[in-house]
């Protein structure tokens, strides 16, 4: 990734990734992208450097519930396809990295629809409670499970206020190359870390744009010129369970 | 008071071997349960992504809490200097070790990756109360083992007071840590309470002593050794105090929660409309584990040893019931992500989570109890843990020879 | 004490006595080490044989925790290079009988833990493998391993 300021523009990030991946990408309007062929495979086509995650960045997403359609599940499908999260038709134990929730205000009856996933807290309770340090936060704010040292105690799932984590209850085969997952460990949204490291946007944001909703903006919260920072400056936004003071990386509008 | 003679039990009767065989069989079944859960994955258990800690944790936490409580009898003797409890100290420390071993075995065998136990022992996140618990458990083994050594090795006797005080302080810290595993969970309505730590300590007093009494009665009854009324009634009355104290802490905990509107939902769930959890709380934890034992201990029924033994069994069952409501009931009540809004999703948001214990989880849990008891049964055969007699004339300082 | 020592000496003797027999009548097949696609591995073969686990373990932490995604010692690259294709042109899992990781680990009787989680074959299409495997290379390497084993015996 080059170190110029423009790298923070999410559209440019996407474009670079796609262009080098030889996937024809047409930008028809800011924030709206059309994809004509299969997406590039991560890690192969992008420039790889040895620098890694930096605290100069803090990756986050802004989700506009006003634009989120109740009957649309595209972000969920895209996420689970991207990361190879399958189902065994056992809803109680099947993992969900991202889910659509529907809200109805008790007083007014107003309904809202929005996706909920790992909120990538600045001070994540899951990281605090993890006995081995498997639950960890990268320098750029992405919260991950290091499955190499996860012992499967599930204390992080007890501690997470967002129900963002799933325990893998059965043997998994045919994992995606970029998303290792296995029985007996805990997992959650990785903010598509493999894509982010390759200079691309998240699968959910990409799918949402593709569906024409543009309800998810991915970007760098530390860059004042990024689209996400601009929108957060301009509009009111909220964090889920802001009372806990976790300073989440995922923010919402219209909740 | 006479000099106390400790002897190992003969342990060559058919009954003795039958007892060990029963424990062994239970442990074998637990081994199968463990294999099934690890081989197939946890989906065959009742646990899921909503109820992430299930029946194994109920047993494990109960045993770990009871372990530190079992040490109390020894502490009363060596820390608080009550001579009558002195002869019971060895068994008390032994039981503390074996109960902890049983509890930890269950906890470890339920892990998603039990093969990575070494990781848990070598990677510590010092902000995690769970990591501290691992250190505290290991330390408990070492300190109590040293304590036992100072009691059983004549040349080390002079150090047993120091060792006893260390063990007592350590066990208080340990149970504070165990309670804080739940107390520190800020996200969940049912936990996130400082009272968890002291409540777990008082629970440990109660469950540890109940198990201690049951083991003592069995050991003395089945080996034909004398267990005098003086010792027995002391223990019984003390257990009564602990049982009442647990009820008091429960009262304080729920009253505090009831005052805050924020917690009305979870309180109504546990206390009123939570179905099975409400029943287990009131019937199991309060009536069976609290009120009935109190009625037995502090009425003329308390003179009947069989009834007192029943009372102690009820305390144990009530303890398991309370753990069930705390651990599983606490998770069954959904996380509140959006206060004031009704929430629905495909991931069980906003609904009371269902949980049915599986045979594997129960097997594993009972296996932990069997392990603890088998270890005691075996240890008292190979080493002199038990006084040859606990008759009043032998141990009661106030005993008057007729 | 004396009995215990005697027991261990006897045990050791038994182990040593049975060693040649085990080697000769081994039911574990010799590892079939297929050479990768490139000219040269990222380190010499004997270094890799001895230290690959350390390289992988160091690399995994760099990648997961620090986001350093270089190709050297990346498990993904190992697999991309050493995975074979079957007759139908589909990649064979690296943990299948006789494949690169599996055959050697089963020979050495060392449990492989990587593939509880990691993909066992390159993603079809993500690694363009134009050149086919050279069977002669694999024969050559097997010979090497065999020689080493005979000298060990």
Image (spheres, coloured by chain):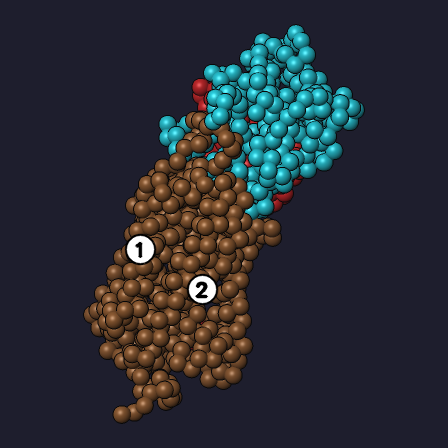
Chain colours: A cyan, B brown, C red
State the CA–CA distance, disc 2 to disc 1.
24 Å
Query: Relative to the observer, which residue lies in front, B52 or B101?
Result: B52
Rendered position, C94 above or below B125: above
SS state under label 1: helix
Q: Do we see residue C40 in this rendering?
A: no
Q: Any mark on residue B313, and which?
A: none
| Horizontal side, residue B31 vs residue A122: left or right | left
The chain letter under disc 1 is B
Q: Residue at x 49, y 35 (%)?
A: B336
Query: Relative to the observer, which residue lies in front, B167 or B396?
Result: B396
Give the residue at the far top of this rendering. Answer: A28
Asked if labels 2 and 1 share a chain, the reply is yes
Q: Position of residue A232 (x, y in %)?
A: 68, 24
| Horizontal side, residue A131 vs residue B24: left or right | right
Report the quarter where the N terminus of chain B lies: bottom left
Q: Counting other residues with Cα less than 10 Å from the Cα at mark 1, is it few (<14), some (14-19), or many (20 or more)?
A: some
Q: Residue at x 57, y 25 (%)?
A: A255
Q: Position of residue B87 (x, y in %)?
A: 39, 80
- Residue indicated by mark 1: B287
Quarter of the rendering containing residue B345: top left
Report the quarter where the C terminus of chain B lies: bottom left
First in sequence, mark 2 or 1: give its number: 2
- Residue indicated by mark 2: B68
Q: Counting other residues with Cα less than 10 Å from the Cα at mark 2, is it few (<14), some (14-19), or many (20 or more)?
A: many
Contact check, label 2 and label 1, Cβ < 8 Å:
no
């Amino acid at each position: 990734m080059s170190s110029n300021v423009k790298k923070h523009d999410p559209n440019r990030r996407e474009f670079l990734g796609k262009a080098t991946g030889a996937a024809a990408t047409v930008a028809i309007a800011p924030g709206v992208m059309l994809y004509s062929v299969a997406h590039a495979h991560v890690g192969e086509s992008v420039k790889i450097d040895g620098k890694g995650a930096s605290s100069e960045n803090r990756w986050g997403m802004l989700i506009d519930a006003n634009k989120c359609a109740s009957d649309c599940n595209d972000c969920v499908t895209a996420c689970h396809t991207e990361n190879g999260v399958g189902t065994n038709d056992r809803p109680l134990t099947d993992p969900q990295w991202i889910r659509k929730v529907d809200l109805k205000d008790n007083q007014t009856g107003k309904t809202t629809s929005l996706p909920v996933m790992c909120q990538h807290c600045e001070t994540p309770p899951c990281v605090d409670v993890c006995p081995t340090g498997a639950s960890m936060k990268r320098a750029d704010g992405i919260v991950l499970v290091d499955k190499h040292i996860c012992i499967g105690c599930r204390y992080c799932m007890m501690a997470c206020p967002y129900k963002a984590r799933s325990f893998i209850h059965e043997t998994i085969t045919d994992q995606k190359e970029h998303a290792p997952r296995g029985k007996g460990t805990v997992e959650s949204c990785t903010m598509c870390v493999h894509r982010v490291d390759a200079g691309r946007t998240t699968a959910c944001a990409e799918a949402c744009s593709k569906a024409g909703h543009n309800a998810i903006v991915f970007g760098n919260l530390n860059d004042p010129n990024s689209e996400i920072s601009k929108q957060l400056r301009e509009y009111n936004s909220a964090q889920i369970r802001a009372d806990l003071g976790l300073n989440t990386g995922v923010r919402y509008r219209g909740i | 008071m006479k000099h106390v003679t400790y002897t190992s039990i003969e342990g060559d009767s058919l009954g003795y071997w039958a007892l060990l065989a029963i424990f062994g069989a239970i442990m074998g079944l637990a081994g199968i349960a463990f294999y099934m859960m690890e081989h197939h994955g946890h989906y065959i258990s009742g646990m899921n992504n909503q109820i992430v800690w299930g029946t194994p944790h109920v047993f494990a936490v109960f045993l770990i809490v009871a372990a530190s409580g079992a040490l109390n009898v020894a502490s009363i003797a060596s820390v608080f200097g009550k001579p009558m409890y002195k002869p019971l100290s060895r068994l008390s420390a032994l039981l503390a070790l074996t109960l902890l071993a049983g509890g930890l075995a269950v906890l470890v065998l339920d892990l998603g990756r039990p093969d990575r136990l070494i990781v848990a022992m070598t990677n510590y996140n010092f902000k995690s109360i769970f990591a501290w618990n691992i250190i505290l458990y290991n330390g408990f083994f070492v300190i109590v083992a040293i304590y036992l050594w100072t009691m059983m090795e004549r040349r080390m006797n002079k150090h047993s007071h120091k060792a006893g005080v260390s063990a007592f302080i350590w066990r208080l810290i340990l149970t504070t840590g165990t309670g804080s595993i739940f107390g520190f969970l800020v996200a969940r309505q049912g936990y996130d309470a400082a009272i968890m730590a002291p409540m777990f300590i008082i629970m440990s007093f109660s469950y540890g002593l109940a198990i201690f009494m049951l083991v003592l009665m069995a050991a003395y009854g089945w080996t034909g050794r004398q267990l005098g009324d003086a010792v027995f009634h002391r223990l019984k009355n003390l257990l009564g105090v602990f049982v009442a104290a647990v009820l008091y802490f429960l009262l304080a905990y729920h009253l505090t929660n009831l005052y805050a509107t924020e917690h009305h939902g979870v309180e109504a769930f546990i206390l009123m409309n939570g179905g099975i959890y409400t029943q287990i709380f009131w019937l199991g934890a309060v009536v069976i584990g609290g009120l009935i034992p109190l009625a037995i201990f502090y009425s003329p029924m308390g003179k009947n040893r069989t009834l007192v033994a029943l009372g102690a069994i009820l305390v144990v069952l009530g303890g398991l019931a309370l753990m069930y409501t705390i651990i599983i009931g606490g998770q069954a009540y959904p996380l509140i992500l959006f206060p004031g809004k009704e929430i629905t999703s495909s991931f069980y948001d906003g609904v009371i989570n269902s949980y049915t214990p599986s045979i594997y989880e129960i097997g594993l849990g009972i296996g932990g109890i069997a392990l603890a008891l088998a270890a005691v049964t075996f240890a008292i055969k190979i080493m002199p843990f038990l006084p040859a007699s606990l008759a009043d004339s032998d141990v009661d300082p106030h005993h008057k020879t007729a | 004490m004396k009995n215990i020592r005697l027991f261990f000496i006897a045990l050791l003797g038994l182990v040593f006595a049975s060693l040649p027999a085990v080697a000769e009548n081994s039911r574990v097949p010799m590892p079939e080490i297929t050479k990768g696609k490139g000219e040269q591995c990222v380190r010499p073969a004997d270094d890799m044989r001895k230290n690959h686990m350390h390289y992988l373990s160091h690399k995994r932490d760099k990648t997961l925790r620090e986001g350093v995604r270089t190709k050297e010692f990346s498990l993904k690259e190992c697999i991309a290079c050493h995975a074979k294709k079957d007759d139908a042109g589909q990649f064979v899992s690296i943990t299948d009988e006789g494949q690169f990781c599996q055959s050697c680990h089963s020979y050495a009787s060392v449990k492989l833990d990587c593939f509880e989680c990691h993909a066992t074959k390159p993603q079809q299409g993500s690694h363009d493998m134009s050149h086919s495997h050279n069977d002669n290379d694999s024969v050559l390497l097997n010979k090497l391993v065999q020689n080493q084993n005979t000298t060990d015996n």
